[in-house]
Image (tube, rainbow, N blue to C red):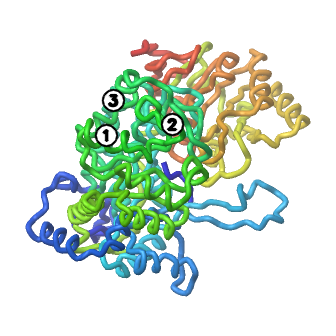
Amino acid sequence: MVLAFGGQAAPQGASAVAMRSKSGKTPRVEASPAPPATRPLDRQAEAWVRRTLNKMTLQEKVGQLVVPGLNGVYTPLDSGAEEKLERLVREGHVGGFHVFGGVEALPPVLLSPVYGTSGARTTKADPLATAVLLNRLQRASANPLLVTADLEGGAGYIVAGATRLPRAMALGATRDEGLAERAGRLAAGEGRALGVHVDFFPVVDVNNNPMNPIINIRSFGEDPAFVGRMATAYIKGIQAGGMLATAKHFPGHGDTTTDTHLDLAVIEHPRERLDKVELVPFRAAIAAGVDAVMTTHIRLPALDPTEGLPATLSRPIVTGLLRRELGFDGLVFTDSMSMYAISRRFGNDKAAAMAVAAGVDVVLDPPDPDAALRGIREAVERGEIARDQLDRSVERLLRTKARLGLHRARTVDVEAVPASLGGRAHDAVAAEVAAKAITLVKDERAEVPLRVARNARMLVLSVVDSASGWREGAPGRVFVPEMKRRFPQATAIEVTDRTTAAEMDLIRALARRSDAVVAATYVRIAAYSGRLGLGDAQVALLEQIAADNTRPLVTVAFGSPYVGDLAPKVKAVLLAYEYGDAPESAAVRALCGEVPIGGKLPVTIPGLFPAGLGLERAAGAPGAPIASSPPR
């Protein structure tokens, strides 16, 4: 999960890097001859793996299994951060790093909590600073480093200036496997340009619990077979882009109401149900040749009855089920070991050792890397981890690095980064996904597209789950100005958890004087928040506006599509599944009849809308329905 935010740019094996021609035209994405995971090693690479493994000390082997986190920000040579990272490389012999965004510390004396939470404000990584830092660490390391990142929404999910793609549920709404493959290829090309080799995506969890506070729009949907098909397409795209794809979170994180960043979740389903639902997409991903699997910090008594033991630390689940029964022989990563489900229940050294003993190859983002290294080494010395198991994991990692060409060239061309990240051609892919994802699930009075004059008194409400923590920019930063461009008399107001009762009264009065109201809801899926949904006062406001049937009211859901509290009272509901530039622009165009609407709902909204529902609209035909697609 790891959600904390925190010429040829890549070496051999990186192939979907967008290249800008000498004429300065927009970049194109070039195909790879073969995914790195399926290319056999040549004689030179095989010799390098054997030679490297045979000369490693125990400490060096243990180091390969630990991948700490780093912040992709400007890091001076003369700094504590640089010193810590270089020590992990030179003395700890770590096998790689996981790239997060930045973290800005906030003094506890600040009076407004809007600036951030928990004493810090998270930002996105800087692309050039990230590439420079990774190059520096690669040069400092005796062996190539394997670099990982969460590119769930493309490289732009964690890196400023890179392409921000809509996440899995938006792709699920398009039902377009070819588009999913193109998105994966694009994300991989941009990631490799920065020096990242492993994408912790796709999420293959089946989101069949509407109250899940952490998976939600990160899943392709609720149908296991469909999730498997979309995930397989995305995996092909990632691999064609020269990067390793990861199926997560094994053996399934969809049917829980607990965020494992905060505590240990439990899924009580019997094995028969797990085989029919949770494990289906993992089997599909493994059959498709996925390179890696990430475990989850969830307890599943049907698979391992040990009290309090999450899947990440369970040998029956990792070795018994994943390795032996499902036949997976790729890399197994833990989810972040800093998540509270692990870090607050087990000691750092003990948790790392238990994960390796369970069968994982990589202990990811331990809160104390030194303790993790020590714990694994001592467990090997005590015989709790077999030395041949350690050697197998190290060999897997070395072979992976060789397939990526890192034994020959491990740094990237920093000068080429601006030609490889972002740009109009890549933005067009994000825009296509966002536009095809727009789903109309309710339109009782045929009000979508809007049938109001350009000079109408439009009220545009941004109804935000919380005023703080908007790492990716202000909600409505595209939606509001684009609505105002089309309706110059529009009034825009933000409604947050801090809006007062008096301000709510004023908004109701403005709604009564308006010709039409568009309410955009922003409900995020955020690690460590533990919340999901709008506040009671916000829902009551929209219900009261909806009670007056004299004017159009359209609700557009950016983020979670589970609008059960609100949907029964409003007359029209449009789903975008994400917020940000591409989804907000796509929603405006759909509202105004500039593009067709054809997305299909990938999940069931309990008691309201079945999965597969999607009312279709043609472009340029305000309010005129084409068809109402039945659920699949």
Q: Is residue 466 left or right of residue 77?
A: right
Tell me which amino acid carries mark 3. Answer: Val
Under tag 2, what secondary structure?
A: helix
Residue 596 in the image, given as x and y percentages of width and height: 45, 28
Q: Single out the mark in the foreground, 1 or 3.
A: 1
Please report the residue visible at 43 percent of the width from the left and 20 percent of the height from the top.
612
Q: Based on the displayed image, in which of its 4 quarters is residue 104 positioned? A: bottom right
Q: Is residue 340 left or right of residue 323?
A: right
Can residue 592 be seen from the camera position used here? Answer: no
Can residue 33 be seen from the camera position used here? Answer: yes
Question: Of the residues under marks 1 and 2, which one precedes in the sequence?
Answer: 2
Tell me which amino acid carries mark 1. Answer: Gly
Question: Is residue 464 shown above or below 150?
Answer: above
Residue denoted by label 1? 320
Q: How many marks?
A: 3
- The Cα atoms of the two marked residues, 1 and 3, are separated by 17 Å
Tell me which amino acid carries mark 2. Answer: Ile
- The Cα atoms of the two marked residues, 2 and 3, are separated by 19 Å
Please report the residue visible at 83 percent of the width from the left and 65 percent of the height from the top.
109
Question: Is residue 129 shown above or below 155?
Answer: below
Please report the residue visible at 44 percent of the width from the left and 46 percent of the height from the top.
312
Q: Single out the mark in the foreground, 2 or 3.
A: 3
Q: Label for residue 280?
A: 3
Q: Label for residue 217?
A: 2
Query: Which residue is at the front of the view, 568 or 301?
Result: 301
Residue 73 in the image, given as x and y percentages of width and height: 53, 71
Query: Which residue is at the front of the view, 313 or 203?
Result: 313
In the rendered image, the quadrant that contains the C terminus is top left
Please report the residue visible at 40 percent of the width from the left and 22 percent of the height from the top.
273
The answer to whether marks 2 and 3 mark residues whose Cβ atoms lie closer than 8 Å is no
The answer to whether marks 1 and 3 mark residues whose Cβ atoms lie closer than 8 Å is no
Question: Of the residues under marks 2 and 3, which one precedes in the sequence?
Answer: 2
